[in-house]
Structure formats: structure tokens, C-alpha cells
Image (cartoon, helix red, strand yellow):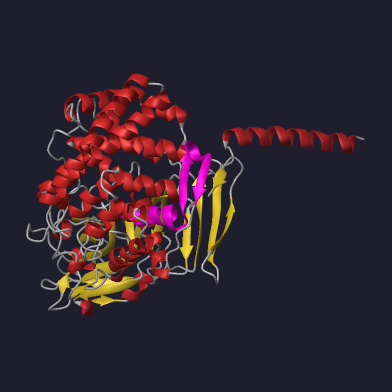
Amino acid sequence: MKKLSLALIIIVVGGVLLAAIERIFPEEKTVQIDEHTGELKREYISPTRIVWTEHGDNISNIEYLLREGNGQADLTNSHICVVKSTSTEHPAILLDFGRELHGGLQIVTGMPADHTPVRIRVRYGESASEAMCEIDGKNGATNDHAIRDFETTLPWLGKIELGNSGFRFVRIDLLDDNRELHLKEVRAISIMRDLKYRGTFECNDERLNQIWQTGARTVHLNMQEYLWDGIKRDRLVWMGDMHPEVMTISHVFGNNEIVPKSLDLLKSVTPLPNWMNTMYTYSLWWIIVQRDWYHFHGDEEYLAEQRDYLVGLLDILLTKRIDENGYETSGGGFLDWPSNANQPAMKAGTQALMMMAIKAGGELCAHLGEEAMATRCQERYAKMEEVAPKIVEQYFREAEHPTAPGSKQAASLMALAGILDAEKANADVLTVEGARGFSTFYGYYMLQAMAKAGDYEGAMQVIRDFWGAMLDMGATSFWEDFNIDWLPNAAPIDELVPEGKKDIHGDFGAYCYEGFRHSLCHGWASGPTAWMIEHVLGVEVVEAGCKVVRITPHLGELEWAKGSFPTPYGDIQISHTRQADGSVKSKIDAPRGVKIIK
């Protein structure tokens, strides 16, 4: 009995002590990351290859830099890359991390004999040639938005982290004379949201599959604290540029907090009557994005928060930007950079964009119970429809050649606004000379207009030819702009440009993206990713919040396509297979709460 009592006392006292210890040193909790929202996650990535060295005889054991690291300096000083300089020779190394990344660089050093810090120069590059260039005003290279070319001092037997920017390549130069640098590790620090790709796409055409994945990853890279346009340059929230990104997010990631967060940021820094990003057409895009975001996700509470700003913005547009006859009064606002010099395209495109925004705003106001504003929008929209034939006639009378910058952009918007017959737009403008004469931004709207015309196979061929050509040139994310006329005699971005070849990064580009200033990871270029789910898998949201979804496949010449589409109720699983008689057999598995129609 005494032994039992003693044991009981020990158990009780032990339990009390354990509880006290747990209060003082609480057990570490595992943080569960919401797969739909995604916290920013750091991942350390070793280089995949050594692209180039200078004074390579002064570098030993360089292959150790390709080993998987652990981020920790140690006293063994084994597996060290040793870089030695003289008074006249300063070695340099160019590393390739295999794919476009957002983040910085971690450098772990060893233990040289003199035990003193060493100065180096670091250059990030989205292409190999960008990492090799100078910021000299001749090639477009800049430190705008993110520092990509800088000097720093490394500790001995230590670690330093540097960044952030968008890059794939890093060049490191040893600057000090007669020094020895011991490099244990040089790793990229990838910073991305930890997100599940809820929307998926796969078909029997591997080129389309790769394009789909690259577009999704391009937007994923730009989903940082806010939704950026680019991770090297344009690390900003641009309202118009957001629309293709928002469509990709809705089709791949579903309802992610970064979209309303970014929309609210622009609203907060743009009190009425100011225009978002200082361009009034970008305020039009705010209305369209709000309509589309509500349409996909059905967030009534968030939409209600937009009431006052929406009604106020529409009042300004109806009062000051559309005359009583239905004409947009600015004479042409900003669409995209290539359109700027094409005044007929700017004028017609802006009229079409205004119609799209007024229609979207009227729909939202009707839903919010703002009947007076909804009626004003409907009446003014009717006036714009009345003058539409004159707008179209003037466009075709004054417009430049269909492949002139801006022509396909304007024709696409007019087709989507319903003022230009989509089949005519497709035949007379959009398909002229194939994948020429449009931008990566407005490429999404051209694909949408081609789908409206029923030219699904033609649109898929444009995707293969245009976006696929970027992959052929070494792209692992899609670019701020691209032109297939750049291709002849051009070297890919993952090699140093041989003598006699063109540098597709440094030798091309225009407007705000000349030469190396050109961003090679721009979210507005992701249009094919949303488009393939919309039109190849055939997913159309009929009722806000995905309560009703129509699925009508358009395989073109594909044998099969399958994938998934995220809804607030769960993910729809979709599979389409062409049968021997040419018909398409579909299998659709929808979550409870989603009604599927054909």
C-alpha cells in the first residue's frame, strides 16, 4: 500500500512539473498553411550548371558549388571552391539556377588563411547575357525597382543573404587584389506563396501542356505581398495589367486573398476623382476585374464594400467621359504600349473598353440594389450601341495594316464588346499573318475574340507559335513583350550570345522595356493558361460563385484533354476524349453545390 501511494505521489508530482514545464516551454506548433491563400515560403536552390568563368585557372573545385548545401559554414573547410585573384586577374563565375526565380542569394564562405572579409560584385540576370552586362545606359540595364547589380563584402567562415529580384543567372566577381575567396555554397533563395494548383490542364499536345504550366508559374511568381506585374521590374500593382493575372488566378488557384488585397490597395491610394495608376482606362479595368472576381467567387461581403467607390467612379465616367450621344470623349486612352502610336486603334479600343466597363458596372449596381446608377449605365450603354457602327466603320477606314501595333488589340476589344462581328474581326484582322502584331498583354483578349468567332484551333496554333517560341528561346516564365520577328539568328536566353548572333534579350524591346530593362517574367503574359481551361476544357461560369457552370469542350484537333477547375465548393474534375466517330465523350465530377449544364 505504501509503495502504491509513493508511486501515485510520483505520478501526480511529475504531472504537475510537466504541466509547469509546458507552460514555460510550450511545445512548438506546426503551422498549417492554407493551400488556397498560401504564406510566402523560402526555399534554397543550388545552381544547376556553371555557364562561364573568367580566369578559370585561378578557380579550383568549382564543381562543389553544384552540390546540395545546408546553409551552414563549418570548420572542416572541405568541399570548398577556391577563387584566387592577383593584382591584374580578378576571377568571375556565372551560375545558372535552372529556372526563373523570385528572391535573393545566400553565400556561405569557408576559412581562407588570412581570415578577413572579401569584396565581391554580384549581378542578377533573367538571361545569361543580362547577368554579364554593365549598367551603362547603352543596353537598357537598370537597378529600377530592385537592385540587380551591386558590390558587397563577404565574411570569412560565415553566411550572407542578398536580394531580392527576379533572376535565373548570377555572376560573381572577386574584386580585391591578391585575395583568396573560399565559397562553400552559393544558393538562390526562392520566395513564393505555398499554393496548390487547384486548376489543372493536360492534353495530348505536350507543347500546350508546357505553355499552360509556364503561364501558371509566371503568375505564381508574381503573387508576392501584392499581385505584381513583374518580379525584376514592375514590382508594382498595375490595375489594367492585373486582369489577365486575375483570370489565371481564378482558373488555377481559386479565391486567393492577394486579389482583393491588391484591388483595395489601389482603391486606397486612388481617391476619387483620381485615375488608378494615373490612367483613366485602368480605372475601367478596376470595374471589370471587380465584376469578374465576383462572378467567379460570389463574395457578397467583399462586393458590398466596393459600393461607394463603384457608384462614384461610374458617376464620373458617365458625367465626364461619355457624351450624351454615346461617344467616349478622351479620343483614346492607354490600352498597351504597342497601341500608343496607332490612333485609330486607340480610339476604337478605348470606346470598346468603356462599353465593357459600363456594362460590368451596371450589372454590379443592379446586384447591389443601386437601381438609379444601374439604369443610368444601361441607358448610356444603349447610346454607345447606337454609335457602334460608326466607330467600327471609322476604324476600318483609318486603321493601319492588321499587323501594325495596336490593330489586333483594338479589333479584339471591339469583338468582345459586341460592336464588331467576331468572325469578321477574326478573318480580317486577328488571323492575318498568324502570330504577329499583338502583345503578350493583349494576346489574351485576341485569343478570347478568336474563341468568340469559333476559331479554337486557330487560337491554339497562335498559342503554340507565339508563347511556344518563348519556350524555344529558353524561357521558363513568359515575358513582358515578345515578337516572333525577333527570332531569326537570335541566341536563346540560357547561353552567352555567340559572335554574329542576336541577343533576344538585350537587342530587342521598345517603349518602357528596351534591352535588358525588359522583364522576362510578367504576369500579364499568362493568358493561355486561363484560356485553355475556359475554352479547351470548356468551363464557363453561368451563375456567380460557380453555382451553375456550363462545360462545352472545344478540342480542335486534340485527341483528349483533362483537368480541373476550382470553385468555392471544391474542384470540378473534367475529362474529354475524342471518339472514333469524331464525337467527344466527357466525364465530369462536380462537388456538391455546383450544377453542371451543357
| Rendered residue at 26%/59% (across/down) | 427
| Rendered residue at 23%/68% (across/down) | 128
Q: Is residue 373 above or below residue 397?
A: above
Magenta run includes residue 545: yes
| Residue 64: % across, % down | 36, 73
* Residue 45 picture quarter: bottom left
| Residue 484: % across, % down | 21, 67
> Would you say 270 lies left or right of 580 here?
left
> Would you say 504 lies left or right of 308 here?
left
Given residues 300 and 494, the one toward you in this image is: 300
Q: Residue furthest right?
A: 1
| Rendered residue at 35%/42% (across/down) | 225
Given residues 4 and 150, the one toward you in this image is: 150
* Residue 389 picture quarter: top left
Magenta run includes residue 404: no
| Residue 4: % across, % down | 88, 37
Name the image quarter holding the N terminus.
top right
Q: Is residue 512 visible?
A: no
Magenta range? 523-551
| Rendered residue at 29%/24% (across/down) | 376
| Residue 542: % across, % down | 47, 41
